[in-house]
Amino acid sequence: MRLSVVVPCFNEEASIDRLHSAVTLAVQSLTADVEIVFVDDGSDDGTLVALRELAARDSSVKYTSLSRNFGKEAAMLAGLERATGEAIVIMDADLQHPPHLLPRMVELYEQGYDQVIACRDRRGDQFFRTLASRAFYRMVNRLVDVQLVDGAGDFRLLSRRAVDAILSLPEANRFSKGIYSWIGFNTVVFAYTNESRQGGRSKWTFGKLFNYALDGLLSFNNRPLRLAIYGGLALTLLAVAYMTWVVVSAMVRGIDMPGYTTIIVSVIGLGGIQMMLLGIIGEYIGRLYYEAKRRPHYLAKETEMSPLRPRSASSSS
C-alpha cells in the first residue's frame, strides 16, 4: 500500500524538520510505501527553503509552493491533487496533529473505512473558545444539510475513492468540513488527547474563525434565505396586527398623539433587519459571482521537480 501524508504549511519554518522526523518515526512500523506532500501556502519566512533542503535529503518528500497565500482550503486541495497514495492523511505542520496516530489510522483504514477521523478533546483550550466552538457546531448541525462532528478537524485519513470524490467537486467556495461529510462513505471516528503547538503561533485569529464559521453556515444550505422569508412574513403579520390595533383604537377612543419613541424604534429596528437580510442575500450573490469566474483554486510557482532558479544578472538586465 502507498500512504500519502499531506501537510499544508504557512510560516512553519520552525516545525518542518520536527514534523518530518516524527512522521518518519511513526511510519517505520508500517509496511506501506510512504510519501510526504508539503504545500507551502505563500509563506514569508524560511518555510520554502526548509522544504527544498528536506526534499534534497529525502526522496519521499514532495513539495508544492503556491504563488501567494491562497488559504488553507486551497493548500489542502493542492496537496490532495499531488498525493498518489491509496490512503491519504491530512495533518497540520505544527504537531498538534500527533504523527504517532498514523499507524492507528492505517489500521482502521485496512478494516474497510474510507474516512478515519481523529477527533481531539478540548483539554487545554481557552474556556470562551471552547464555548464558542461548541455553540458553532450545535448551530451548524441544526441549519446545514450535513452533520459535522464536534471537535473533528482536517486531521483524517481518506481512501483514494474518497479523495477522488472530493477532487470531483468543482466549487470555488470550499468548506472542507462540510465536504467531508457530504461525500459520505464508511466513516469511523476515534478520540485523541489535544496537544499543544510545537512551534510558531496560530494563524487563526478571532476574525478568521468567525469568517470560517460564516462560510460553514452558508456553504451547505439556503436556510438563511428561508429565514429571511419567514422573518419578512412574521414582520408583515406583526405590522398588520399593529395597524389593526391602531385603527380599532382610533375608532373606539378617538385619535391621540402618536408616540415618537415607537416610530423611531420601529424605523431603526426594521431598517437593521432589512440591512441584515440584504447582507445575507449579498453573501449568496457574491458566492455565485466567484463561482461564475471559474478561476483556479491556486497557482503553483515551484515544486521539487521544477525548483525555482534565480535569474542571472545578464537575463535580469
Image (cartoon, grey):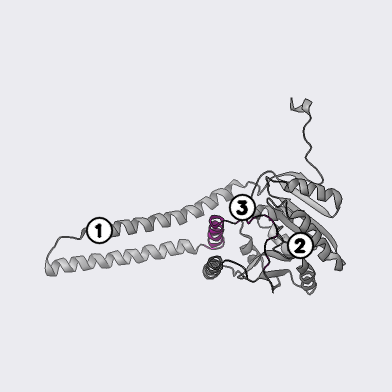
Residue at 59% across / 68% down in the picture? Answer: 146
* CA distance for labels 1 and 2: 61 Å
- How much space separates mark 3 and mark 2, taking CA atoms? 22 Å
Is 291 in front, or is 216?
216
Q: Where, by quadrant of the figure, is residue 169 drawn?
A: bottom right
Q: Which residues are magenta?
A: 194-221
Above or below, 35 relative to 100: above
**In this rendering, position of residue 51 left or right of residue 249:** right
Label 1 element class:
helix
**Residue lying at 81% horizontally and 65% vertically, measured from the top left:** 26
Depth check: give the residue in front, 2 or 55: 55
First in sequence: mark 1 vs mark 2 = 2
Foreground disc of the pair 3, 2? 2
Residue 264: x %, y % from top left: 27, 57
Classify the position of the C terminus by image quarter. top right
Which disc number belongs to residue 88?
2
Is disc 3 placed on a helix, strand or loop? Answer: loop
Q: Secondary structure at mark 2?
A: strand
Mark 3 belongs to which amino acid?
Ala
Image x and y of residue 246, in percent: 20, 65
Camera-side mark, 1 or 3: 1
Farthest residue, direction left: 254
Q: How many numbered marks appear?
A: 3
For residue 172, the mark is 3
* Label 2 CA crowd tier, 10 Å (few <14, some 14–19, many 20+): many
